[in-house]
Structures are given as C-alpha cells and as structure tokens.
Image (tube, coloured by chain):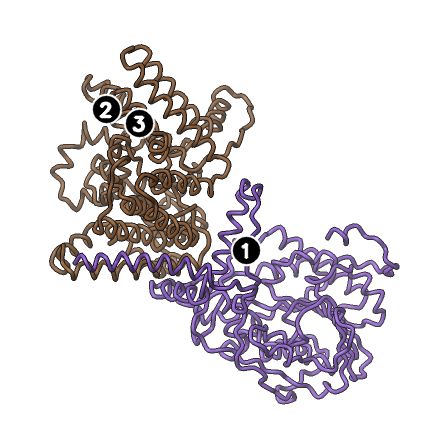
Amino acid sequence: MKKIRIIMLLVFCVMLTGGALATWLVPDREYSALENRELTQSPEFSGREFLKGEYQTAYESYLNDQFPMRDRWVDVAVRLQSAAGRKDINDVYPGTEGYLLEKNEEKDCDSGQVEENIETLSSFLNDMTQTYGDKHVSCLMIPSKTLALSNRLPAFAKLPERKEIINSLKEKLSHPNELMDLLEPLQKHQNEYIYYRTDHHWTTLGAYYAYQSWAEKRGQATPRPLKHYRQETIFTDFYGTTYNKVHLPVPADEVTLFHSPAEKGIEVSRDDEDEEADTLYFPKETSNIGCNRYDVFLSGNTFKIEINTKAKTGRTLLLVKDSFANCFVPFLTEDYDRIIMIDYRYGKIPMGTILSEYSDITDVLVMFNTDKFMENTKLGKLAQTEKKEQTMQAFDPEEFLG
Amino acid sequence: MVFSSTIFLCVYLPLVLLGYYICPKKGKNLFLLIVSLVFYAWGEPKYVFLMIFSILINYVFGLLMDKHRENKKRLKLMLVLSVAIDLGLLSVFKYTDFIITNINSIFNTGFDLLNIALPIGISFYTFQAMSYTIDVYRDNVRVQRNLIDFGMYITMFPQLIAGPIVRYADVQDQLAERSVTTADFSEGIMRFVVGLGKKVLLANQMGAVWTDIYALGGDVSALMAWTGAVAFTFQIYFDFSGYSDMAIGLGAMFGFSFPENFNYPYESKSITEFWRRWHISLGTWFREYVYIPLGGNRKGVARQMLNLAIVWFLTGLWHGAHLSFVMWGLYYGVLVVLEKILWKPVLEKLPSVLRHIYTFVLVMIGWSLFFCQDMADRSGFLKAMFFQAGGGLANQQTMYLLLSHLCLLLIALIGSLSLLKRFMNSRLFPENTARREMACMVWMVVLFVACVAMLVNSSYNPFLYFRF
C-alpha cells in the first residue's frame, strides 16, 4: 500500500513535469486553423511591463494559447460539459441533425450602435430611393441561422428575438416595402439544407430561396427555377466558424456552387488585386487545410468588388453587403451588366464618392445578416451620400485616423 | 498567480517542488520565502513591497516586545503600535473609499474617492501577522529571531492569497522542523487535486449559472430565483473551500500541517453550528483576538451581546469594504444571538430534516446579501424568491436553465455533503487498503485531467475571495 502511495506520488509528479516539459518543448504555433486566429507568441520581458502586470497577462495568455494539444483538451472540456447535461457549450447549442446553432444573446448587443446603424441604413435607403426610385431600391435582412432554424433548437431554449430591428427600420423608411425580412421565406424551407451546419452562413440553396422571394416580391424579373442552375458540390469537408467555437463531432458541411449560364465571359476585379479574374469561384485557393472554404465565393471579402457580365440588360447594380451576398451573386449575373459590391467592414470611402464614380447605377440592393448588421461599427460612411469627386489625395484626417 | 491556471500547474509548481526537494535542509525556508515572494509579485508586482514592509515591521516589533517584556507599559505600547500599523495599512488600502463614502453620506460632504487598488491577500496576511504580534505580547509563542523563517510564515504561497488564516502559534514548531512522509505527500496531492476540482469543475460552473440568472434582471420566476440562490450558495462554498483544500494540500507537500478551514458547513443544523464549520480560521481568529479579550461571555449578558455585535460587525467588514458586507455580518450576529437566547429550546426539539432546511435557507438568504450588492437588485431578487415579483413559479427560461444544469446542481449538492465521504470510508474502500489507495489515485488522475481540460478551454477564472 505504501507502494501505491509512491506510485501516486510519481504519477502526480509525472503529470506536472510532463505538463511542464511539454509546454516548454513543444514548438510554438503561429496560427490555429481550427480556431481561425493567430496564437499569442512569447512576450518580451521588460521590468516595466512586469510592474504593470501586463507581462504576466501576456505570458499566461501565451501559455494557454500554446498549450500542447490544445485542441484535444478543448474537445475533452466540451465533451465533459455535454455529459454534464449542459445544453449550450461555449455559447453554441447542439441542434438536431448535427446543426450547431449560435446563442446570440440580446445582452451582447450595444444598443447604441444598433440604433446608429438603423439610422445610417434608413438614411442611405431613403437617399437612394430619391435618386433611383423606390422600385429600384431594396434591402434584404437575412435572419441568423438560429432564428431561421429555430425548429432545431434543444427543448426550452430561448429564441433569439430580432424582430424589432425590422420594425424600427420600416418606421424610418420613406417606402417601407423596400425592406424585406427573409425570415419567413427561409423558414418555409427550414428542413432543407439552407444554412451550413458548422458555419453561420447560409448555403447557396438558402441564398437561392432568398433570391426567389426577392424576385417574386419585387417583380423585377421572374425568378429562375432551381434547375436553371447547374449545381456543383466543390467541397465536402467544410468546418466553419460555429465549429471553431465548439468542436462537437458533427458531419462536415458541403459547399455547392450554383453555376449560371451567364458565367462565361464574366470579369471580376477586386480593389486589392491588380489582375482581373474570369470566374466567381476560387476553389484552388481555398482547398488547403485551414482555409475558410466559404471564401471560395469571390475569394472572400474586400471593400469593393466589381463584376462585369455579358448580360446586356443596361442595368447596373450597387450591392451593399456583408459576406452573405458572396454566394448570392450568381443569381444576379443575368440581370445586370455590372454589379458593384461594397463591404464597409473593409473600407472607408464615403458612399457619395462611389456614387459619383459609377454614374450609371440603376439599382441598389442592400443585403445584411441581422446579427452582423447589429455588430457592425463601420457603417458610418454609408450614409454619406453627397456626390463628390474623389479629389487627388485629398487629406481627410478622419480617414487617416480611422 | 492563481492555483487554477496553467502557469501554476505547468510552470510554477513543478519548478518549486523540484527546487524545494533539491535544496539542502538549511536553505529550504529561504527557498520557500523567495518563491513565495515571486508568486505574490506575479500577481502584485508593486504591492509585494508593501507586504515586505509589513513583514519587517511585525518582525521588528516582535523583537522589541520580547526585549521590553519586563516593562509592562512599554510592552503594551509596542503592541498597540504594531497593531495600529497593521490595521492602519489594511484600512488605507482596503477601507479608505468606504470611509470616505460614509463620511460623505453622514456629513453631506463631497470628497472624491481615491480608488486605491486593493493588494491581493492583504486581509489574510495582515491577520496572520497580527496573530504573531498579539501572541508574542501574551507570551503565547516564542519570538522569532530568524527573519527568513518569519518571512516564510507570512508569505508562504499556499495560504497567502486566500487562507486559511494560519495562526503563528499553530505552525511555529513547523517553521524550523518539519518532515514529509510519502503518506503526507500523497494526501497532500489528493487534497490539492480535490480542491482544484472543486474550484474548476464546480465553483466555476455554478458561477456561470449564477451569471446567466443574474443577467435576467429582477422579474424572474420564483424557481429561477431559488436556482440562482442555490447556484451562488454552491459557488462560494466550492470556490473558497476548494482554495483552502488546495492550500492545505500544498502545505502538506512541503511538510506543513495547516488547520482545517471548512467542515461540510452546509450540513449544519443551526446558524451557530454553521459558523463553527465555515471559514473556521477566521472565526477562530476573531474569537481569540477580539471576542475573548473583550470579555466574551464572562461579563454578563449585556456585555456579551455587545461583544457579539462587535465581532459580527468586524466579521462582515473583513469580507469587504461595503455596507452590504457589514449587513451580512450583522445578519448572522442577530441570528446567532436569537439562537442562543430565544430559539435554542425550539431548535433542539425540531427533527433533523427541518433543522437542516432552516439553516440552509437562512444561509442562502445570507449569501444574497453577498452577491447582490445593489440594494435594488437584492430586494428584487428576494422578492422573486418569495413569489412577489411578476415571474410566477416557473417559465420556459427557468425550465431550460434548470434542465441544463440539473446534473451539475445534483453533483454540487452531493459534493457539499459528507455523505460521499462516509460512503467511501465505509465498506467499499476501507482505510489503509490497497484498493482505497488505487481508487484515490485513479480519482486524482481523472480530476486532474478534467481540470486541465476545463482550464485550457476557458482562460478567465479569478477566485471569488480574491478581493480580500
């Protein structure tokens, strides 16, 4: 029995030493593909930083980030919580059929920012309506996955409530019909694969149903049927943002491209690339391990993407967006000669400047996911719609200082 | 530094254990002193000097008192000075803003708050230092001439940050002479890992439940309010007793035997009993150094009431520089007095079950004073508990939360009772058998692994009793 005590002693010491050695010897990683973020590196020691306590915080954060086999440990923790009956882990509900549903709490929102964004957006839409007419301006609000797929939530879970945003916006619009809440149209297809299981985005099928509702409602063009598009499943190993929060063993997602006949002859230019591309899709660049597969659409986000098609309709669309629009674009390529996509999370040019640069705009479409819309802190420039030429290198202190 | 962190488990503890056992016997105390200072400095890089100053002051006054033992007047003066300095430092760093706030409300003045940062552990180490000087005055302990040994007593990292408050008299012999057997060490390991488990696996989870419920505001259903109360009742127990377990366990690894600080307090059958089982070292300290010197119960009932009022006022005040803590202390003071004078005969006749419930409910209500510092919050919460808020018995949210955490709440309940321990001790794993030792080892490894996983998964878990 004394032997066993000695063994326990040894086991404990081995665990401690093992931990110590492993932490020391295992080389530092720079980036975690699974968590989709950079990992803290070893901080420099300085007496001053130590006195402020900042060195300590940085060091502990470094230790935690570089913990050997960190991902496996997180897995264990998730399984433990799951076993203890916890219905949501790391703010994610494990929904039915492998759907991971994010738990976005009302309290996580900065209501001041939300109000500001509502003001900005409604002001922008009203300005656009004045310039282009209400029949040519629309705004699509895309519900969060958890709200759209609320039928998949665990019992008694609280439904996220976002309706007030829609109502607040409608109140401020000169033509409230421009605003479309996509919740109902999408909920009709709740049991289909309209959102990714492991990512917060909608699938291309979900985007298609949105397009269908939009076209029907706005009467712009008869919506093309599903079979008009050639579907190609390009990835079957997509693990998205929700999965990064909690690595529950759910089946991987499939990314499907909907090819439209108008894809030939398309030109895509991004403001961060010199060369134009001749396709909407970038499978080669996004097929490596650790890449975000959703970036296959247009190669990810940037401030401005200009798409020129051979549609010959004489119409040009200004599309103000977040990442949800990236897989929606194929459904627009046959209706517009040119599509100008603007994402204010990546740039600061006032809208007015863009409007003067593209004087042939005929239609305006805004597409936002409600959660991202509420969190967005950079929408300000959207409302600055006074047309002004972008003078050569005019020094704008605000742009400089952000 | 916090025990429940990767830096402690993977860097500090292995290095310190290694260093301690490599160190020659004569150097062990110095080694512990140095590493403890590093431990403290890691969390309080600037205030470590304050603690060093406090050590020097108390050391010097100890020597002075011993020197002037013959001169009663001078002896008393030395004591008064040292206690004044100790309490003075504590007051400045902990109670300044509290004093200013009270002055402002009483005299209608508008003094600005100074926002002095509270050095971690100051309430604990100050009381430990005073236990030394007061006992030197009383000639209860031998004066400590070795500054290193004295410094080590004050700074020893196991109990530095959150107790137990180890009286000098209890460990003075262990400072110079101590040894560690494998039995001691392995029990220390067990104790430490169990404490770690209490903190990481139970206290933190209960804290998360309480945070969720608290965020819902005042109009919660009654069941929700009670669940919240149960959550923080368990949180504070597992947090604090877990820390004490870790302290005792770590102490054992270095050959120290620290007194127990918790004895399954939620099993108590009366409030009086509760306070003999909760934060035992604090109760002992106040009894030794405040209640008894004031006369205790030996000067008549009226004086006893006053003494009790003072002790409970101070107990509350020790916990925090806020009116709600003082109220919490007085709440218990009143209950203890009532139990002594009025309810004793009634209580003794009640069946055990009712006595348990009576105590547990009163304790939960007491904690609400602790956790809802805002008056409005507190009354709202208490109202909800007694069906006075609009929430009704239960609603969808309540069911969701309850179902999510039922398993955990049950585990917490079992963990807070000595049932499990008695079961383990009885027939399945009799003491001193190989089977028991194996079971302990397996359990230790399982707990340790689970704790590491939870720690890696979350990065932020400060101890509740940290602001002391």
Residue drawn at (31%, 14%) of the image:
B68
Q: Secondary structure at mark 3?
A: loop
Label 3 with label 2: CB-CB less than 8 Å = no
The residue carrying mark 1 is A42
Foreground residue, A174 or B461?
B461
- Which chain does the numbered disc 1 sit on? A
Q: Residue at x 45, y 69 (%)?
A: A247
The disc labelled 2 sits on which kind of residue? Asn
Q: CA distance from mark 2 to mark 1?
A: 51 Å
Q: For chain B, what colour was chosen?
A: brown
In the rendered structure, are the residues bearing label 2 and label 1 in contact, judged by CB atoms less than 8 Å apart?
A: no
The reply to whether callout 3 and callout 1 are in contact (CB within 8 Å) is no
Q: Which residue is mark 2?
A: B140
Q: Above or below — where is B85 with respect to A96?
A: above
User: How many other residues sit within 10 Å of disc 1, few (<14), some (14-19) or many (≥20)?
Assistant: some
Front residue of this view, candidates A42 and B277: A42
Q: Kindly state the secondary structure of the residue where label 2 is placed.
A: loop
